[in-house]
Amino acid sequence: NEELRVLILYNDEVNTFDHVISSLIQICQHESAQAEQCAFITHYKGKCNVKSGSYNELAPMKSALLDRGLQVTID
């Protein structure tokens, strides 16, 4: 079975909270409260695990978030 991976969002000085939140809702299927919490954690701690799953599940989300100018990695 495929190893569980984590999609990590990193803080930047470019994107607004609203952009990050709407991106997480649309791409990662977050509830709005969850997306807001992730945005604040990312802002204050520098990064946040926003989604876990297999690499194949996370890779399209990573690409879509990168296309929106967000900084994300899969670990």
Image (cartoon, rainbow, N blue to C red):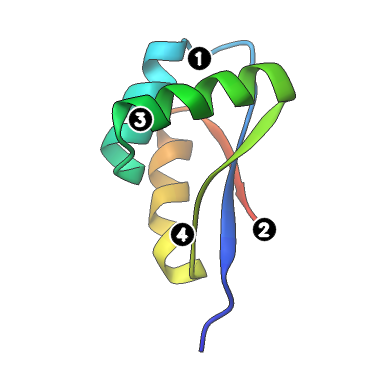
Q: Which residue has dot 2 on it?
A: 75
Secondary structure beneath disc 2? loop
Q: Is residue 28 left or right of residue 43?
A: left
Residue 20: name its quadrant.
top left
Q: Which residue has dot 1 on it?
A: 15
Where residue 66 appears, x then y in whole percent? Answer: 48, 38
Residue 14: name its quadrant.
top right
Where residue 60 appears, x then y in whole percent? Answer: 39, 56
| Residue type, label 2 | Asp
Secondary structure beneath disc 4? helix
Q: Comparing marks 1 and 2, which lies closer to the viewer?
A: 2
The label on residue 59 is 4
Report the front residue among 27 and 33: 33
- Give the Cα distance between marks 1 and 4: 21 Å
Which comes sooner in the sequence, label 2 or label 4? Answer: 4
- Give the Cα distance between marks 4 and 3: 15 Å
Report the front residue among 2 and 31: 31
